[in-house]
Image: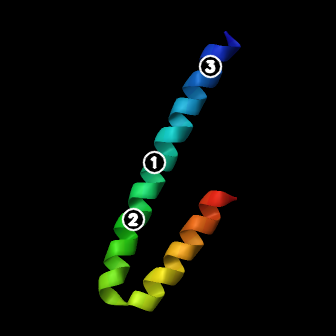
Amino acid sequence: MGDRIYGVENYYKEEFWSGMRNQSERNYRRLLKNNRLKAVRAMDIDTSLMNN
C-alpha cells in the first residue's frame, strides 16, 4: 500500500521537475536572444533552486 502511494508521488514529482526544467530551458533561450549576460545569471538562479 505505502509503496504504491510513494511510487505515484515520485512519478508526479519527476513530472513536475521535468516540466520545470523544460520551462527553464525555454526561458533561458528567450533570454539568450535578448541579453547573453542576463541569461547566464538566470540559468544560474534556476539551477541553484533545482539543486536545493
Residue labelled with disc 3: 5
The residue that mark 1 highlights is: 18
Callout 1: 10 Å neighbours few (<14), some, many (20+)?
few
35 in relation to 23, above or below: below
Residue type at tag 1:
Ser
**Rendered location of residue 39, percent (x, y):** 44, 82
Query: Disc 1 and disc 3: Cα gap in Å?
Result: 20 Å
Specify the amino acid type for callout 2: Glu
Q: Are marks 1 and 3 in contact (CB under 8 Å)?
A: no
The x, y position of residue 27, in whole percent, is: 38, 70
Residue 25 shows which numbered tag? 2
Spatial CA span between label 2 and label 3? 30 Å
Q: Residue 31 occupies which quadrant of the picture? A: bottom left
Which amino acid does the dot numbered 3 rest on? Ile
Choose the circle earlier in sequence order: 1 or 3: 3
Task: Report the number of numbered marks.
Answer: 3
Secondary structure beneath label 2: helix
